[in-house]
């Protein structure tokens, strides 16, 4: 049971970094991936503990990889159009 508390602490740290540091897009994307990794480990540990099917974990990994690739594509398009990943350097209201 202490492992779940450890990985819950990892998720809380990821949420804290996500909510406190909003200067760079890359840092927010990394904190989101950190949260997803903690959720994956908790879900895997829980499903292995009670001998459930692990197909849910595969679906979770597929969606988290899609989320990561979408975030990276947004990061690349912002760097190409604005030159950096600072949130203060451009307005989100512009098309």
Image (cartoon, rainbow, N blue to C red):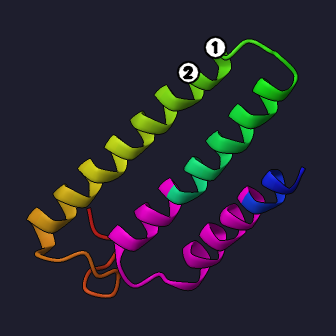
Does 68 lie within the magenta span?
Answer: no
Disc 2 element: helix
The structure residue drawn at horizontal position 49% and vertical position 38%, both measured from the top left corner, is: 64
The structure residue drawn at horizontal position 84% and vertical position 28%, both measured from the top left corner, is: 49
| Residue 31: % across, % down | 50, 65
| Residue 11: % across, % down | 68, 61
Q: Residues within 10 Å of mark 2 (few under 14, many from 20)?
A: few
Instruction: Give the side of residue 42 with respect to residue 94, left or right.
Output: right
Q: Badges 1 and 2: C-beta atoms under 8 Å apart? A: yes
Image quarter (top left, top right, bottom left or bottom right) of the C terminus: bottom left
Disc 1 element: helix
The structure residue drawn at horizontal position 79% and vertical position 53%, both measured from the top left corner, is: 3
| Residue 70: % across, % down | 34, 43
Q: Which residues are magenta?
A: 7-33
Seen from the viewer's position, the closer of residues 52 and 92 is: 52
Image disc number at residue 55: 1
Residue 92 in view in this figure: no
Image disc number at residue 58: 2
């Amino acid at each position: 049971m202490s492992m779940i508390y450890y990985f819950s602490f990892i998720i809380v740290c990821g949420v804290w970094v996500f909510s406190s540091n909003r200067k760079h897009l890359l840092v927010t994307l990394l904190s989101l991936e950190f949260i997803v990794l903690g959720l994956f480990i908790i879900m895997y540990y829980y499903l292995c503990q009670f001998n459930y099917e692990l197909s849910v974990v595969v679906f979770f990994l597929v969606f988290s990889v899609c989320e990561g690739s979408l975030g990276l594509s947004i990061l690349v398009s912002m760097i190409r159009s604005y030159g950096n990943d600072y949130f203060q350097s451009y307005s989100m209201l512009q098309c």
